[in-house]
Image (tube, rainbow, N blue to C red):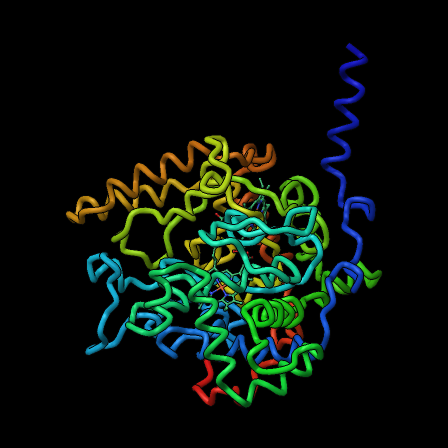
Amino acid sequence: MMRLFGPLVFVTFIVAAPSSAADLPKPVTDEDFRSYPKAQVKLGQLLFYDRILSGSFRVSCATCHNHDRASSNGFLLPEVAPRQGDSLATNGLDPYSATRPSSRHAPHLFNMGAKQVKALFSDGRVGARSDGSFFSPSSNPLPQGLNDVLAAQSLFPAVTGDELTGTVESEIKTASHIGNQAVWDALAKRIQKLPDYWPYFQAAYPNMQTQGDIDISSIANAIGAFVGTEWRSTSSLFDRYLAGDSTALSAQQKRGMNLFYGKAECSVCHSGALMSDENYHAIGAWPWRFDADFSAPLADVLKGRISVSGKPEDAFKMRTPTLRNLSYSAPYGWAGGYQSLKGIVRAHVQPNPAYLDKLKEIRQAGSLWPETARSTFQTMLAARSIVTPDYFRTAQPQEADQAIDDLVAFLKSLDDEKGVRGVLGKPKEVPSSLALD
Ligand code: HEC
Ligand code: HEC
């Protein structure tokens, strides 16, 4: 009896104790980030903001990862949808599917340059192997000479219909019927023809001889360098606290921190100073945008890690997001299903049957999709790989509510206004002279 009892007391003590220095992550340092040549970062900034990379000349990376919206968007994209009178490239699809804009909000891009980030997207479908090669869903092999996972990622918006390729006829759209490599070649041609880009390429890649040397890898490496540098968020109140300033957090934020690293068990997945284990878990978060009308079946990517691994146990598992500058990047969850931080935190610990009730109401009102939506969501809840912490299982509703408020207060201590402004910010103009997002 004693042998069993002893360790139990010990474990209970550890869990209940306020976070000690040993539980907290080490402060983030420059060592935790990749570094990039300045001239590549500058060139990448121009390309990131330049609509020249889109078929329709109307969309740039910054349309979705917007400077004024903390590198996220938070809204449906009228810019991506065609305008009246456009000749639509339906590509064999009915016009409705071909014109539907991105079903998800764009995630923020804070701390993308951290060395711990080895795979990207909610299901980790683009990533770096330890031998330096890359995996991705591309039908064509990726071009040679890519620097890192961010460079590899930046190739994909260009070949995605509801991102840069667009739905409007263009030479890029035509190339997309041939394959990814044809799109990448067509984009490199566009940039080669713009003389104002050439000085930036020369500065970034001193070995280049002529504009004809501009290829998709040099474009991708520059965009990756910019994405890896621009939205660094490492000077929040919590960072100051980790660095030794015990007055940086309010009493409520400290309570939230103690829960986060203790009884609420958040740091099991949101581990390290950037608060992600870079792994995949099914928490059963609402899988549609908060304002969705359920007019579409669940997008493949929101089925989770299973779409990459093919393993049934990976159904609905998503990559653990880092938790920086959340005040600026609503809605939350990969699908953008929650408008408030409180909503998504509650979804982790108390899966909300209210959502099912909401669906029931809509069904009674006679809408077509709720029944499919309802059963999908129920399947997701059943597939949850998150274990509701004992604390939330036993706490009185009022206490649980207070705990969630404290956790949200702590999450706000991870805001970093300096990080939101970016390192280079938004350029005044881009070499193509197209409008800026
Ligand atoms: C139409 C909107 C849209 C455009 C345009 C767009 N993105 Fe994204 N971006 C998204 C969405 C949505 C995701 C999430 C995809 C997923 O997880 O499956 C994403 C994901 C990313 C990620 C990975 C984030 C993470 O944490 O895994 C990076 C990096 C990124 N985009 C960079 C870019 C770059 C660079 C460009 C321009 C070349 C670009 N995006 C253009 C919407 C967009
Ligand atoms: C089992 C692993 C796991 C645990 C434990 C966990 N999370 Fe998460 N968290 C995730 C995953 C995975 C997502 C993404 C879910 C999605 O988009 O479907 C997420 C998303 C979030 C988000 C939204 C971030 C964004 O940018 O949209 C917040 C905030 C968050 N978690 C806070 C917490 C807090 C607070 C706790 C403790 C109560 C916690 N998490 C515990 C895995 C976990």
Along the horizontal axis of the image, is 166 left or right of 187? left
Along the horizontal axis of the image, is 290 left or right of 199? left
Furthest-top residue in view? 1
Q: Image height check: is 194 above or below 189?
A: below
**Quadrant in which the N terminus is drawn:** top right
Question: In the image, residue 319 lies at what x, y percent?
Answer: 55, 47
Number of numbered discs present? 0
Q: Image height check: is 240 above or below 299?
A: below
Residue nearest the observer in this picture, 22 or 426: 426
Q: Image height check: is 426 above or below 250?
A: below
Displayed quadrant of residue 390: top right
Which residue is depicted at the point 42% across and 43% down? 303
Question: In the image, residue 48 lies at what x, y percent?
Answer: 53, 75
Which residue is depicted at the point 37% across and 66% down? 175
Which residue is depicted at the point 63% across and 75% down? 422
Question: In the image, residue 180 lies at what x, y percent?
Answer: 44, 60
Which residue is depicted at the point 34% across and 47% down? 298
Question: In the image, residue 226 lies at what x, y percent?
Answer: 62, 72
Residue nearest the observer in this picture, 300 or 394: 300
State whether residue 402 appears in this view: no
Furthest-left residue in view? 366
Along the horizontal axis of the image, is 126 left or right of 229? left
Displayed quadrant of residue 51: bottom left
State whether residue 216 appears in this view: yes
